[in-house]
Amino acid sequence: MSNTKQILAMLKSRVSGDDEQFYSIALQIAATEARRGHRSTAEDLRTAVDEARAAKLRGVGVAIPFARPRGDLESLIDLKEPKLRIKDVVLHESVNEKLEDLIRQQVKRDWLREHGKTPNRCVLFVGPPGSGKTMTAEALAGELHLPLFVIRLESLITRFMGETASKLRLVFDETLKRRGVYLFDEFDAIGSHRKATNDVAEMRRVLNSFLQLIEQPNATDSVLLGATNHPELLDRALLRRFDAVIEFESPSDEQIRALIEKYLRPLKRPRLAWKKIIEAAAGLSQSEIARASEDAVKTAILDERDTIRTDDVLRRLNDRREMREAFSKVER
Ligand SMILES: Nc1ncnc2c1ncn2[C@@H]1O[C@H](COP(=O)(O)OP(=O)(O)OP(=O)(O)O)[C@@H](O)[C@H]1O
Ligand SMILES: [Mg+2]
């Protein structure tokens, strides 16, 4: 077999998850090398295969990090492979500092454990819609090289009325088995005082089991994140149990500029009137500013321009503001 053929065959076996085939090709290459008189290369290859096989045996029962949840879990948890890093998110300095602290504790968790300390792992993200909470969860997973699992509590609760507590336990069991960043999105769905959902007892049960589950200090190496727009709806008892609460706020002037620059990036933007732009963006969320900038870029692309002008951005920001006002009228 030529080298390219061997590489192709290895890739195919990889894709189909056929490990034995993968190793067998590696051993064939080792044999070829041995025939050519490259004894030590052949030996290295054989040792590597032996080690890989042994590692796999040791790993039996431990799920492969990026494998999709199966069975019951499939409908409860969404897997996202993180593509972002913290530097991709425009954040307040205080948020960055808290994230760095969390990352450091996680990266050096063995060290902390040796000294009898539990690394922080339970964090609540609080902030208005579109301020980057979900995005930050992904970036955090990216920094830690972990898969991101998103649990949408609202849907878990409504879909499994009566069995939410047991479903939640299933999710928690998974956090023990498989290290990852677990984002409990729309967290207020379980934490709230508000009893809009008719089954009060059910909510209480779910809340209690959640509290018990996050209480076990060394139970998991996973990172558990809650995200909410409504911290005031959360129970004090619940807030107390988090290792940290990170507040996401509306963007500062500097961040508005950073956001627009980030999302305009592929295009040239000679001397924008930043003062005007920042004024027009005031009151919009990070997400609205991002979308407005992207819209400006799309228009420029379709117009076959490679340059963005102040007016392009202003127009799109005003569109977003109008949308927001229209919505708030509907809500009232
Ligand atoms: N801080 C930020 N930096 C860069 N981009 C951002 C930021 N915040 C939001 N965005 C953009 O807006 C999109 C939506 O943001 P995201 O979903 O993270 O907000 P959220 O805080 O989770 O909102 P919600 O409370 O509605 O769930 C992101 O995918 C990203 O494109
Ligand atoms: Mg979100």
Image (cartoon, rainbow, N blue to C red):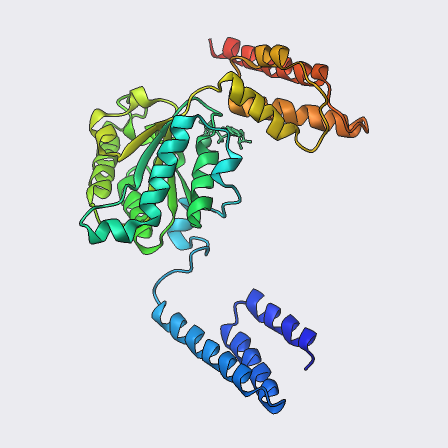
Q: Residue furthest left?
A: 116
The answer to which quarter of the image holds residue 96 is top left
Measured along the vertical axis of the image, is residue 147 above or below residue 247? below
At a point 41% along the width and 45% down the height, the residue shown is 77
Task: Say left or right for 203 vs 133.
Answer: left
Q: Position of residue 159 (x, y in %)?
A: 38, 38
The answer to which quarter of the image holds residue 279 is top right
Q: Is residue 158 visible?
A: no
**Quadrant (top left/top right/bottom left/bottom right) for the N terminus:** bottom right
Q: Position of residue 10 (x, y in %)?
A: 59, 72
Measured along the vertical axis of the image, is residue 102 above or below residue 127? below
At a point 27% along the width and 29% down the height, the residue shown is 199
Task: Say left or right for 108 vs 249.
Answer: left
Q: Is residue 277 visible?
A: yes
Measured along the vertical axis of the image, is residue 6 above or below residue 177? below
For the image, the number of numbered tags is 0
Measured along the vertical axis of the image, is residue 275 above or below residue 131? above
Q: Position of residue 318 (x, y in %)?
A: 63, 12
The answer to which quarter of the image holds residue 319 is top right
